[in-house]
Amino acid sequence: MSTPDIGIDLGTANIIMTYGKKGIVLSEPSVIAYNTSTQRILAVGREAYQMIGKTPAYIDVVHPLANGVISDDLLTQCMIREFLIKVCGSALVKPRIIICVPAFITDLEKRAVADAVMAAGCRQAYLIDEPIAAMLGAGINIGKAKGHMVVDIGGGTTDVAIVSMNGIVTSHSVRSAGNAIDKAIQKYMLNRYKLLIGDQTAEQVKIKLTNLYDPRDDITMTVKGRSVMRGLPDAIELNEMELFDAMEDEVFAIMEAIKKVLEETPPELVGDIYENGILLTGGGALLGGLRELIHRTLSINCVLAKDAVHCVAKGTGLAFQKINNLLDGFEGVTIYKYQ
């Protein structure tokens, strides 16, 4: 019986899985809900996400990953196991898994990820850096002596890297990413309007109203929440300019990360980047006006990857086809074999 190969993009906000030649078979929030009294798992993924902020005291809904790394080992194992059951059914054959991780995490954190997927039920675990997976998923040939730059904006981290000859030349990661931007929006609404809004509301505002290149004050959106002053439901009209002010610090932290990587890159590769442009991947790459802002600030063209949200997951799945090259030439890949 052939063993299934599964690629996992284990993100802070979402988990995306590929299955053999089928491609992407699962894309759901990295959320788990459990009963604190009985310790029984109630829901994972999209079903658990819909419970956020709406459960009684004895039910906890948590993100077991924070800032790109595991914050709760046991819950992460349970979540991965439930997703593997969704993908594989009750198959007895343990899969081989490649799972992508942020480029900056420590060996100890990498070991925690490998242990989590092994405990969840797999035969062999491989770890690949997110920038490498993003490049593979975008269909870029990184085996040549030519520099390519990727900015992967996920939920917990933003990874910026220069890749050449199957390896990462220079990289930098920052915590400024999707979740940090959501928190910044919540903080702005609380400080400016004394309006308390939830995570999901902040995310919807970010998706629908963001304009980083040319924000206007005549384009607005109604934001609903609870007035801190009165303790009652309230709503205000938020415009693009105000939202830009709320997000500015986090967005420019990403810009500074890009500048830092370029400053540390050999001149010959910088010339390649000027020619090839910057590849944007991850859900954060879809922020309105981000490409234009980077081009205006750095004078470098930006290319939004096709299917940017799933780009890293696709690359993780494609890594199985290049497994020999990964073992020989990819400095960013750590392999854990369990006998």
Image (tube, rainbow, N blue to C red):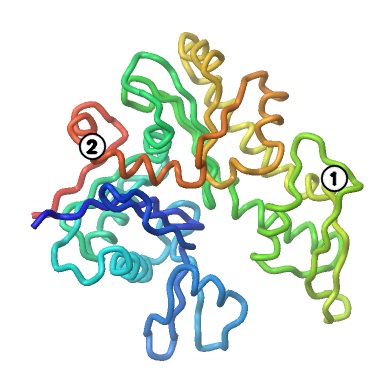
Whether residue 89 sits left or right of residue 36 in the image: it is left
In this rendering, the answer to whether 11 lies above or below 285 is: below
Per the model, the C-alpha gap separating discs 2 and 1 is 46 Å
Which mark, residue 92? none
Residue nearest the viewer, comparing 3 with 261: 3
In this rendering, the answer to whether 33 lies above or below 107 is: below
- Residue name at image x 86 percent, y 59 percent: 192
In this rendering, the answer to whether 259 lies above or below 285 is: above
Residue designated by label 2: 321
Residue at the right extreme of this rendering? 218
Identify which amino acid the numbered label 1 is placed on. Met
Q: How many other residues sit within 10 Å of disc 2, few (<14), some (14-19) or many (≥20)?
A: few
Q: Position of residue 335 (x, y in %)?
A: 21, 43
SS label for mark 2 = helix
- Residue name at image x 62 percent, y 77 percent: 53
Residue designated by label 1: 241
